[in-house]
Amino acid sequence: MDSEFSHKAGQRRTAPAVDPSGEARLMPRRQFLAVSAALLGGVVLYSPEQGLFCAAAQDQVLHVPLRFFDSTQALIVGAAVSRIFPSDESGPGAKEAGVVMYIDRYLAGPYGSDRHRYTQGPFESGAGELGYQGKASPREIYAEGLKDLASFDCLEPAQQDKALQAIESSLFFSLLRQHTIEGMFCDPVHGGNADMLGWQLIGFPGPRMSNYDDVDRHFGEAFRLAPVSLGSGRPSEAEE
Amino acid sequence: MKTQPSVDVVIVGGGWAGLLMAKELGSRSSLSVLVLERGGPRKTADYFNTMDEVENWTRHRMVQDFSLETITLRHNDAQRALPLRQPGSFLPGTGVGGAGEHWGGVCDRMSPDCFEVYTKTVDKYGARRLPQDHSIQDWGVTYDEMEPFYTRAERLIGASGRAGNLRGKQIDGGNIFEGWRSSEYPLPPTKIPYFSSLFDSAAKSLGYHPYPSPAATPSGPYTNPDGVTRPGCTYCGFCERFGCMIGAKAQPTNTLLPVIAKHRNVSVRTGAWVRRIVFDRTPKGGKARGVSYVNAAGEEVFQPADLVILASWTLNNTKLLLLSGVGQPYNPATGKGTLGRNLTHQVSLSTVTAFFEKPLNRFMGSGGSGVMIGDFSSNVLNHNELSFIRGGILQAPSHGAGPIGNFGIVPKSVESKWGSAWKTAAIAYYDRTGRLAFQGEHLAYKGNYMDLDPNYKDYCGDPLVRLTLDWRENERQMANFAIARSVAVVRAMGAKEWTPSLGLESYDARTYQSSHLQGGTIMGKSPETSVVNPYLQHWQVPNLFVLGGSTFPQSSSARPTLAILAFCHRTADAIIDRYLKSPGPL
């Protein structure tokens, strides 16, 4: 078999599972999100600069490098996703799982700029069943949507909920909600689901190579396993 | 234009159909065979660390890049078609293996009456029962003729299942309504996870006839007649929309490539985007001289060949013939022309979402595992008492549920879609939710067809293919029937609450249905009503063959993949045993 290949038509699908898009590295600004480590309680985080690292509980504040948002935007998005998926009696939520970091990496990467969407014009509106026909990319939808949430992170929770109810039917909100779910339950290599908190909430064990011995057993009872991640689990302390 | 050295056979598309044909021709002849694939190379080892739901499920890593090419869609001729700008109701593949890499692996046979859909329906119910604007027609081949090829296809992929009709003898536990089989499945059925087992018991209690889903996710290690060995499925749950991490699920890369690699007369050239079939017109039709494509460097290349085989998925087969001016485009106003007609999808829907008291452990499963009933098939239902014709298969799949694709589904009693109440309910219901799925026949209509879009272009600057497609009353009534029956089944399964599907209105391209689009270059008995003959040979251009679901005159209730493989085997035999000895119409 021969193979002459580097066609644009096929490049994307041979990319590695973890997509460290070079694109965002070109962005001049580098801002950081300050995260209270006490709140996190010692979790595994992913950063493109450091790879996986462990945030020890004794550190007061972590400075997580941002790739798309500025720190003001990150605080707003962080506060908003925490109302969508709050920390409450049913367990930790979007804040602890680092959902804002997932969204930041998503928007900085190729999907944030619509690299794989059909973006040739003319842009026209038609029957709803034909799907999103707009020109705006996720980055643009976020940038525009965040204008409606100025100072959101300074509001009381009840006021925050009101502000979100006001935009509930917008495309921005539906993206925010979808990305919250993705950031809660993605493999931690994508920046969210820190310490596999999301998976622990719902009893999902992550990428396990075999369920052969269990798939036809445990009928009617919860079969729960300690989750594993693609990123080879918890890194050594030395990396921190 | 650069010209490559001539080959005996050029195959357009490196998916199930193209690579199976390459394997057959490469193994059984000394012909030089070249497969042109526009995507990248692939092999089993590429998948070992791809159990990543974000990449595969959400971002469609295995799917055709929609920024380069998509389709346009409208519901009827009066609308202006708009592009499907992101993957939606179906997921075409790209790269070596095509959509055969990310399929689910359900491999059922069509019921015998599907091949004679016009005759059998009219014989039983009269022509008056056919919808007014139908274009239903027979395939020009019968199930009895196809049976040996189905058997070969099942042996190729190591189909796992239980026969329900062995040479006419009904066997309980299999699908007793299926067509006869000359032999048992190559492998016993896959394991039955909890949710599917609840369906199995409930279906029996209601007098239905459940059977394990036929699966290309093998129940154990398997060595096929080519000597290719694959391991048994481990039910990891990362299956449909994924390549198999261990090479268990039958995929072109793990089933066909190992054989192709042994044959020096076969090569696969990736990064080759075929744009035209090059042919000389003659008074009777024409003769193909090869194809032209854009290569990795963006150069136009002419690839001469004596025999041209199109195997580039349903929509693109039609598009290539339209762009090349081969055959007469279908005109819905006059009914003249054949190319592009009989576009069908499939009535694929989740009929009901059911909520249970006990956890289902539904992260375990495979794309092929589940339990089905054939009691709503076209050959079982009595349509004199129903508001639709034909039918489908109802099933309780256990595909292995990932959290992103399945989190957040809550009963109607939970009103919020975000916030504490929703989150708490969604966590509680996450592993207590199951869905039944129905796959029904989508009838062929005069108004559902394909042509070239006048406004939107692909990566190469060629027009996109335009789908004019909508449901009719028959599909809506069939879906309503399936939904009502499904509700009774989940009640018998012990569900505490359930949300029935809203049914079908207009064709909705936003959410996934199935990748089972069919038609456009259909087979048939006459060049007046079909593009290829029942050997899938072009009526006007005898050294051109077309493979795949585009040749099916109508969708059936079965998944099309096994039939595609069966028809490929039949065409390979016809080419090797007859065509090569005397090139010309078969």
Image (tube, coloured by chain):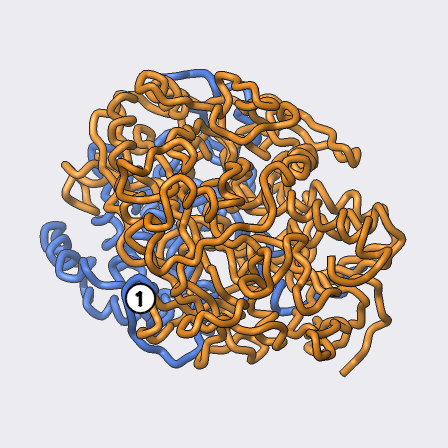
Residue B56 falls left or right of residue B495: right
Comparing A105 with B139, the one in front is: B139
Quarter of the image where the C terminus of chain B is located? bottom right
Residue B523 falls left or right of residue B134: right
Amino acid found under the numbered disc labelled 1:
Tyr
Q: Mark 1 lies on which chain?
A: A
Q: Dot 1, crowdedness within 10 Å: few (<14), some or many (≥20)?
A: many
Examine the rendered structure and indicate whether residue B424 appears above or below residue B241. Answer: above
Estimate the x, y position of residue B277 in percent, counting from the top left: 68, 72
Quarter of the image where the N terminus of chain B is located? bottom right
Comparing B224 with A19, the one in front is: B224
| Chain letter, colour blue in render | A
Q: What residue lies at 73% left-to-right and 79% top-to-bottom?
A: B282
Q: What residue lies at 25% left-to-right and 66% top-to-bottom?
A: A146
Examine the rendered structure and indicate whether residue B363 appears above or below residue B103. Answer: above
Residue A239 falls left or right of residue B437: right
| Chain letter, colour orange in render | B
Q: What residue lies at 77% left-to-right and 43% top-to-bottom?
A: B258
Q: Which residue is disc 1 drawn over?
A: A142
